[in-house]
Amino acid sequence: MKRIGRKHRNKRSVSKVVTGMLFGSVLGATIGWLTAPTSGAEMRHRIKGEAMGVRERAKTAVGNVESRARALATEVNENVTDVNESVTRP
């Protein structure tokens, strides 16, 4: 009988875990929707509203990151200029 290598066993274990997670996620979502206390139209409206809120928060976060990146780039450029000037002076 062939012996199964450790690497092959690990791959099978990982695939079982991933399959179980996917199955559990689908099953949980299905049960959640079937037992939800609101109608489908109301649930879709609520999900759409929450998605829009997440979208707005993401836009704000992107704007904050961009402005901080610009500020850091300006600071780095100023520091490079200062270092460059101090190195070029005798």
Image: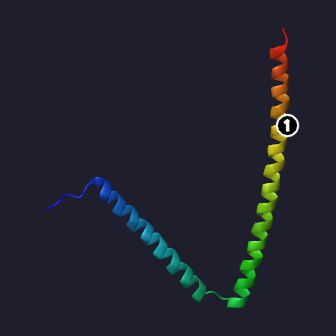
* Percent position of residue 7, x then y: 32, 54
Q: Tell me which residue sits at (44%, 67%) in the image.
A: 18
- Is 47 left, or right, of 56 in this rendering? left
* Percent position of residue 16, x then y: 38, 67
Q: Tell me which residue sits at (78%, 50%) in the image.
A: 65
Position of 38 relative to 23 (above/below)? below
For the residue pair 23 and 78, the one nearer the viewer reads as 78
Q: Tell me which residue sits at (43%, 71%) in the image.
A: 20
For the residue pair 89 and 23, the one nearer the viewer reads as 89
For the residue pair 1 and 51, the one nearer the viewer reads as 1
- Is 20 left, or right, of 79 in this rendering? left
Q: Amino acid at mark 1?
A: Thr
Q: Residues within 10 Å of mark 1 (few under 14, many from 20)?
A: few
* Percent position of residue 74, x then y: 85, 37
User: Where the C terminus falls, by quadrant?
Assistant: top right
Q: Give the residue at the far left of this rendering.
A: 1
Q: Which residue is mark 1?
A: 74
- Res 72 → quadrant: top right
Position of 65 relative to 31 (above/below)? above
Q: Give the residue at the far front of this rendering.
A: 88
* Percent position of residue 26, x then y: 52, 78
- Is 73 left, or right, of 18 in this rendering? right
